[in-house]
Image (cartoon, grey):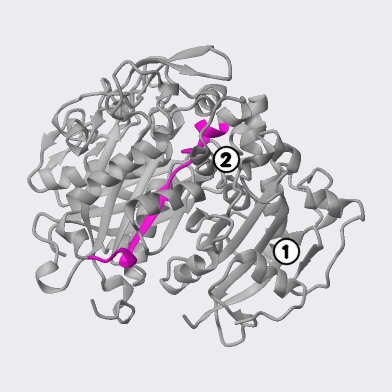
Amino acid sequence: MSGVVIGAASYLGPEGWANDRMGRRAWPSELRPAIERGELEGIHWSMVSASDPSRFARMDPMCRLGLMAVEVLQLGWDQMPEAQRESVGVCLETCVGSLDTDLRFLQTTRPSLFAYTLPSTVIGEVCIRYRLKGPVLCVMHAPDEPGAAVREVAEWIKAGEAEAGICLACEALDRSTADSAGAAAGLGPVGGRAAALWLARATGDSRGRAWTAGSVIPVARRLCFGEELAC
Amino acid sequence: MGDPVETPAQSIEVTVAGCGAITALGRGVPSLDRVLRGADSGLRPAEFRTGPGPATVRLVAGPVSADALGHEPGDAREDLGDRAFRMALIAAGEASVNAGEALSRISCERQGLVVSTTKAGIEALERLVWREAVDAAEVARIQPGGLTRDLARALRVGGPVQCVSAACISGLLALRQGMAMIQRGDADAVHVVGIDVISAFVVTGFASLKSMDPEGCRPFDRARVGLSLGEGAGAMVLARARGGEGEPSESGVRVTGWGSSNDANHLTGPSRDGSGLALAIGRALAKAGKRPAEVDCVHAHGTGTPYNDAMEALAIRTVFGDSPPPVGSSKGALGHTLGAAGVLESIICVRALEEAVLPGTPRLREADSQAPTSMVFEPRPEPGLRTVVKVNSGFGGTNAAMVFERGRA
């Protein structure tokens, strides 16, 4: 599938955050173990970007991480015409999905949480912030299975269904929330991680790597932390 | 089968080989056909749990009966075990049987599975949190990935599997993914199964949004005030049309176009101008190579909420102008089956094409002044019915459309 390249990558996880054009940025020291436990309250938008979105405070941890991953791509949205945004698609892959918020909603029945009990809500938040109207897809997979977003977005571009697309992966599960459903349940990996890849059609002067397979988080992590991708 | 990769994806035709269903109308596709025979509705008052205690709430909704699930008619819902998985097996089993020879000639390794759901495993999660007895197998199916794995095993699917969870457009996106698996050469047949259940979680959530009609939903009606929850499973076996003798017959139904979009507007409310849904319909028509004037029927999302139906009416006007094709909605019969809706309502479209009948709009009495002028109240024969567009919209501002056609291209 020639002609589709990864134009940008971003990663946020316990080890820190970065995009593929900057060095690794560390969280404040106390945050790393918290993120490993999936306690994400300490992560704020201002740690990665200015112009705090007004909706950020009301989002659940999954949406916060996902939106931050797209922001960290630093795509220069101000220069992107509205018409072009109509053909930018978003595909999410996740194995934990909205489980963390599902459990919180079951325990509190807070109405404001209900909209966040769908994994695809993070796609809605991304599309609202960046005014994207292209094709959408949310695929859930088992922990031992690869994600599908990279291939799907590459196929959209190849088929002319999108000019470009964001492959997003987002996993947010708080250990204490998971334990509330029974520690032995093993419903998903605990912790907080998100990553995004910007896929676009290759042009004569485009930089980027031809890469149309694999799961978003490991691919983005390698690109962002300067590790070589194994073919 | 030759090397499928060598065939351009768009030239590979995908047909509907078989369908299966279980809904508030009963078990089996013939029960769903009642939507094509009259303004029949499965909506009825029923009691639903809202939490760990004995408290229940009475709603007009579309529950699947214990009888349809193979239990005694009087058995309580909470005693029926993993209802979602049971429904999925019933619908998928029927679709496989109905697919018959078209499926039996394809090896397990060339069969795929796409599951569509929003909250199929939620009842087991409720029981875990409420410290009630729950079977280990049900716990393993709480997350959609586990449900998909178990369903693949039960169906003996050895090819690609995927689970789509994208709110109320999940079903149409799952059909699109099934179609893509075939057109990309990853499979020759794909089982697409949509499932969702009415749970305490779902009841509490929609009650908190104040989006339910206490009298039962009335899509596109002047007096509509909200939706009705429904549950069930729909299954469709999609198959790669064979060259020569295997080409779709005159009565065969093909999936020929799809499109999706985001409103980029609001998380729980539709865009007020319908532009996002119009984009999705336009993309689906372009993919199918159809002009709006060639569409014979639009099967709407039609939830019965004031904003959704008004938005859809605007989108239909945007795409089709002041003389739209006939428009119908099935949610007055089934309720809103969430992640199963796209598959179940697509089965109604397929059956409508096979029977040459325009589906009606159960529970619609007096059309809203803003509703499409071509609303179909009661089903009626339409011998020229060849192209149906199915649309769904959902939370997160998502929209999807799919084109079904009868006969040869």
Can you identify the residue that label 2 sits on? B267
SS type, badge 2: loop
> Does residue B209 appear anywhere in the picture?
yes
| Residue B197 pos. (x, y %) | 42, 32
Q: What is the three-letter code of the residue carrying label 1?
A: Tyr
- Disc 1 sits on a residue from what chain? A
Label for residue A11?
1
Q: Is residue A74 left or right of residue B385?
A: right
Going by the numbered disc 2, the residue's amino acid type is Leu
Residue placed farthest to the bottom in the image? Answer: A204
Q: Secondary structure at mark 1?
A: strand
Q: Position of residue B62 (x, y in %)?
A: 35, 25
Total marks in image: 2
| Residue with the most extreme right position | A29
In screen coordinates, is B128 left or right of A36? Answer: left
| On screen, residue A171 above or below A231 | above
Q: Which residues are magenta?
A: B106-125
Magenta includes B8?
no
Q: Residue A149: where, in percent of width, then height?
A: 53, 63
Return the x and y of residue B217 as percentages of the image width and height: 36, 23
Residue in the foreground of this view, choosing between B322 and A23: A23
Cα separation, mark 1 vs mark 2, equals 25 Å
The quadrant of the image that shows the C terminus of chain B is: bottom left
